[in-house]
Amino acid sequence: MGTAGHEPEPPPDELAARFRAGDETALREAYDRFGRAVLHLATSTLANRSDAEDVTQATFVAAWLGRETFDPTKGSLIGWLLGIGRRKVIDRLRASAREARVVETVRQLPEPVGTGADPDTVVDRLVVADELARLPDDQRRMLELAFYDDLTHQQIATVTGVPLGTVKSHIRRGMASLKRRWEVDGAAPGPRPAGLSGAR
């Protein structure tokens, strides 16, 4: 009993309680103990190792900032951390898909024509871009996918992982906001772009 040796690991529920209470040494212990499991979860889904490491860091930051929402009676600390990690992996996959789509869209743009585009068309697009920038993020993103990428509602739902009904309501609300502003400003551009017309 009195032999010199390292202290036994504290029971997980004691670590969880200290973590939830805001004990910073518990954050370090949780990272040392569970960081590899979260990293393994991330690397098993994400091809890029540095993305997986970023997700692992983001998981522990989110867990620490939201530690008061952790309920030890509903599950273990590792289970809770892996749940956060899973959501962070999904966020990273969606962000990568968006980046890839934007790069591909830009790559497919036609070369500028020497004579220049029709000035009215340029002005219309600038007005639309300016108005879109004023919308809430979700509405703006859905309208940009419809307007600039000419995606159908179903394609937008597939690309973003947002339910089809939510996509439709974001687009409907966004269009209503744009219409109200254009009527007030008297700046309504010409015909609506194909990507925004009708139910798709």
Image (cartoon, rainbow, N blue to C red):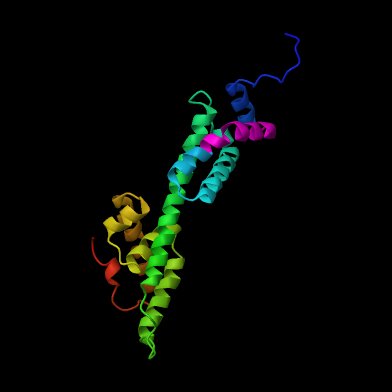
Find residue 109 and report its horizontal and vertical position in percent.
Answer: 37, 75
Residue 28 visible in the snapshot: yes
Up the image or down, 164 lies above or below 115; here it is above
Q: Where the C terminus falls, by quadrant?
A: bottom left
Please tell me whether residue 130 belongs to the stretch shown in magenta: no
Q: Quadrant of residue 95?
A: bottom left
Residue found at the far left of this picture: 199
Find residue 141 and report its horizontal and vertical position in percent.
Answer: 40, 60
Up the image or down, 9 lies above or below 162; here it is above
**Residue ID at (35%, 57%):** 170
Name the foreground residue: 140 vs 184. 140
Q: Where the N terminus falls, by quadrant?
A: top right
Find residue 172 and report its horizontal and vertical position in percent.
Answer: 32, 60
Residue found at the far bottom of this picture: 115
Image: magenta residue range: 22-38
**Residue ID at (55%, 36%):** 36
Up the image or down, 1 lies above or below 13; here it is above
Q: Quadrant of residue 21?
A: top right
Find residue 199 and report its horizontal and vertical position in percent.
Answer: 23, 61
Q: How many marks?
A: 0
Q: Is residue 76 left or right of residue 156?
A: right
Q: Quadrant of residue 171?
A: bottom left
Q: Is residue 167 left or right of residue 126?
A: left
Q: Is residue 94 left or right of residue 40?
A: left
Give the main secondary structure, helix, strand or loop, of the magenta stretch.
helix
Please tell me whether residue 35 belongs to the stretch shown in magenta: yes
Q: Is residue 46 left or right of residue 120?
A: right
